[in-house]
Structure formats: C-alpha cells, structure tokens
Image (tube, rainbow, N blue to C red):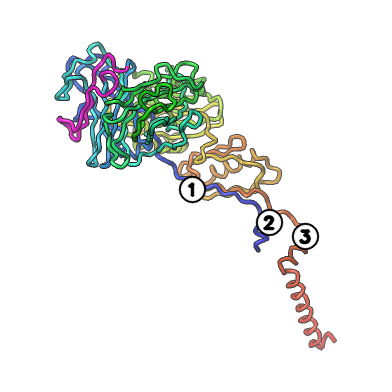
Amino acid sequence: MRLFARLAALVFVVTLLAPTFAQAAGFTEFEDQPVKDPDNSEDDPLTSPAPVPWNLAPFATSFPGGAKLIRGSLDAHDVDAYAFSLSAGQLLLAALFEDPAGEKNDTQLGLFSGTAPPPVTSDDDAGPGFFSRLAFSVTSTGTQRIAVSGFGDANWNGSHQEAANGLVPYKLVVAAVSNPPPFQEAESNNTLASANALPPEEGVVGGALTPGDVDYFKIDLEPGDRLALSVFDLVSPVAFASANGERNDALLGVFTPSGALAAGGTNDDGGPGFQSNLLVTVPAGQGGTWKVAVSGFGDGAFTGAHKESFSYLLVVARERSCPNVTPLISNIVVSTGKTYQTANLIGGQHYYVDRTTPGQHVLVDVPSQYECSQWLMTANDDKAVTSTSYLSFSLAQPSSVYVAFDTRSSTEPPWLATGFTETGDIVDIADPDKTQEFRVLRRDFAGGTVVLGGNLPSGAGSNYVVFARPLNLSDPQHAFVISGLPASVTVTIGSVVITVFRQTGQSAAQFAGSIAGAINGNSTLTAQRIFALASGTAVVTTGVITSVTVQATAVPALPLWWAVALCAALGLLGTSTRNLRASKSRRRTRHDRDPARR
C-alpha cells in the first residue's frame, strides 16, 4: 500500500493563517475649529477626548506595530486631548512634529489618568525647537489621555497664546510597547545593503548601539510621504524605562534610494537630552527604498566612529501622500443629476461633495489596507434615494468595490444586503453625530459597468460612499491561482468545504470559472453573503479562505507488464494464483461430488 500511496496523485495543501487585525495608517483630529476660536470653546477637551481608535480597543491590539500617527491642528485657546486604552507594564512614548521643526510654535504635552489636571507627567521643550516629547512607564491598565496645548497653559484649559495667527498643523506620534518591543533589530544590519525592514506604516524597533556600530533600517516611500523618526534611549534592556536622553547620545540619518544622505536628513539633539527627532518629506522623483541609520554622537559620516553604548527604541511613523492611486472609476452617472467626484482615499479628506465644512465630515481613521484607493465622493443630500439604479460607473479593470455604510443603521437596502459582504472593518469619520462611523462592505467585479442602488430603504441617516482598488490576487486569505491543469481543487471557506473536479479539456481559466461558480452556487455561502469571481486563472472570494487543496494529476493508467510487476512486488500475484488454484480445487471437488455431472 505504501507504493500505491507514492503513485497516487500529487496533492498540495495550503493552510492559511487567520486574518490579523488591520492596522490603521493615521488618525485625524476631528471637530476642530477652522479658524481662531475667540469664545474659547473646545471640541476635544480632557472631559471629551477623541478616542484612538474609535472604539477604544486596547492599543496593542489595534496597532500591532506599537505606534500610531495622529494628524492634528493647534488653535488659539485650544487643547487637543486623545484617549488610549493602555496596559500596565507598557512604555508610553510620544513625540510632536511640525514642518518648521518647532521653530515657530511652542507646545506642551501632558499625560492624564483622569479628566482634569494635574498631569501624571508633562513636557514642554524636549522635542525639536519648542516642541514636546515624553516617555512614561504605564503603571495601571485603563484609559489614559494625552493632551496637546500651548506654552504656559498650566491649567490645561486653552489659556495660551500659541496659534494666534491661525491653525498650526502638527503630527503627534504615540507609541505604547511592552518589553520586549514587537520588532528587534538584527545585529547584521550594519550596512546600507543589510538594512532591516521597518514596519510599512507605523511601528517601534528595539535596538542596541555599541562602539563602532551603526544600525540601518529600510522602508519603501513615495514622493510626498512624510517619515517621522524619534529615538528614545533606555536605562537598560532589563529595566525597560526611558533614560530621557540623559545618559546617551544618538545620531539619526536618512538616506535616499540612491544611497545619498538626504538634505536635512540628519539630527543629533532634536529629542530630549541628547536624543534624536526627525521629520523628513520625500521630494518629487525620489520614491523608492529609503534607509534610516542610528549611530552615536560624532559619527557624521555614519561609519561607526563613535563610542556610544546603549539600548534604544526607534519610533517610526509614515504619513502617506498616495501619489500613485490607480485610476479605476470613470463614466459616473447619478440618477439625481448631481456631479460626483473621485479622489485619493487619504485620512483627513472630506467624504461628501456637499459637506465641506472644515473639521466636519472628514475621514478620521482609514484602515491601512484601504488607504490610497480611489474614492468616489457622493452627496449626502442624496441619502433618501430609493432607486435600484441610483449610481453607475465604469471600472477600468477587475476591481474590488467597497461600500462604506452608516453604522447607525440596523437595516440595509436589498441590493446591498444580498450583493455585498461585510468585511468587519470600520472607517472612523468626523460626523456631527459622533456615534456614526462607516462599516465597510465588499464585492468584486470583473470590470465594466457597475450599478448600485440608493441608500433607502434602510435606517441609514447618512448616504453611503464608495471606493475601489485593483483586485488583489496575491492575498492568500481571499484568492488563489490555478497552476497547471490539476485534476481537482478543494477550497475551504470558513467551515464550508467545496471540491470541484476539472472537466476533460478545460483550461485553467475555465476551471477557475467553475470553482467560482461552485462557490457562488453554495447555499450556505450565499446565506453568509460570500461571493467569488474568476479572473484569468485566479479565483478571488469575499470570504476568508482557510485552506486550498490541489490534486495536481490523476492516477495514471498502468501498462499490463507494470501491473504484473507491481503485483509481484507487493506479493499480490502469488496470492491471486493461490486463490485461483483453490477456487479450481473447490469447483473440481463439487464436480466430483455431483452425480448429475458424472
């Protein structure tokens, strides 16, 4: 039997990991005032901070990289407070960045365990220029608040003179990591060529400098992207507490894809004490793999000419500019006659064509896998449309189309309820009703014309919006490619197992179509609103694929001499001969005993 097993068809089984929590790519402060605020009103005070993320899920769960970038603006008489769910034992790190490197404005950062001063800890000028940084060992699990205010605001109520001439945009990077941090540098990263990969969006790296050592890291950036970097030194790897730059002296360097030290791409003492803080913007035409170097004081050439020796945490955050969004949507037709627009899906942008008040109806927090999609901005005044052909548009290529729908509604229009799949993802938005978010639903299309119905009948109080991105055939949780001409494919989606056999003469593309058809024809998956699409030799589904089993070839027919030799090798031939002789003997005995046959 072992030999038969070896001769059986080759079977390949791919088991897929469960989906990981999607990391968001930048939070936008919401409900901020668009101009100087003379009445000292405040939208994000300590008593009503903006939750990060929207549901205040634990920081470590929501942001696996350990860091989060927040886009905000400081107004006159303004305090911007943000709430986080932190755990005891985490090291909390926060750094403020501004384009002019803090030379024109003076902020202060405070950490609060409650809703009123005094802060647990605060900082005025530990960042570049007059900007702020802080580090704190979290001692109790629960909600913590970080507030951004201006110099001199001792009561944290907006009593400061900063931003008197208008809003001052800033970037606040917050990190909360446990010991050890989620990513550790490999000590082989001592050259540009051997740089360790950084998290693609936001994250924290644990590293160690020794005399003569330079640690290199790499990250892919596009023109217009901003890269925020901040070094925090540790008292010791065991204590896992920030030294606040009091004992050690780091040097940061950033290198372009060509290997040249970027203009303005070095910093020595921009952070607390002797630590480094750096914000770099990628110039036009210089997209590609950038390198980050951590070295010690005096090593301006980044050759390792220093004597520093200490452990550190490197906090990194990337703010995307999305210059290369794939143009997918065209020929937009709206039943109400309004003019809809396409845009790049980036946090901080308005999501309706008819709601453009600064600070309202803004994308606050977009999951990173959706950023840089093509966004179709609808009109909120069209929220009462009931037509089943309210919105149509053309797709230039096979694409995933996403509908972002009002979370406050417990019902959906029929076209959405029967035609799109819940992703479980949320787009955090700034709506006058702060309880509203957008939940994301998906359907894949081969290209060509897509027709969507109106917002009603449903309980949605706001209109939906749409975005699209090219079909991702390399996502193992939602797609697989037919390789060669297999005999059959078994795919497991959730707990549903479907096996499809390739018909004689079917090409790989036709076989992919049969598999997609079988998925779409499965009643259990239909009830779960799970769909599939064939694209070339690939199959993509809106459900989560847990395994794919491919039977590569059928069992070949064996020549007679091969069968005889195989049976002999297995001892089957002798057994058959003995059985045949025994059978003849039994027949002969019966013949001898039967008088009628004599």
How many C-alpha atoms fall within 10 Å of the one at disc 3: few (<14), some, or many (≥20)? few
Q: Residue at x 55, y 49 (%)?
A: 498
| Label at residue 562 | 3
Residue 36 position by quadrant: top left
Q: Residue at x 24, y 20 (%)?
A: 107
SS of the residue at dot 1?
Answer: helix
Residue 330 in sight from this viewpoint: yes
> Which of marks 2 and 3 precedes in the sequence?
2
Give the percent coordinates (x, y) of residue 353.
38, 19
Query: To which residue does mark 1 refer?
Result: 524
Query: To which residue does mark 2 refer?
Result: 7
Type of the residue with mark 3 = Trp
SS of the residue at dot 3?
Answer: helix
| Magenta-drawn stretch, dominant element (helix, strand or loop) | loop
Q: Measure how far apart labels 3 and 2 are at the Cα level.
A: 12 Å
> Which of marks 1 and 2 precedes in the sequence?
2
Give the percent coordinates (x, y) of residue 492.
52, 48
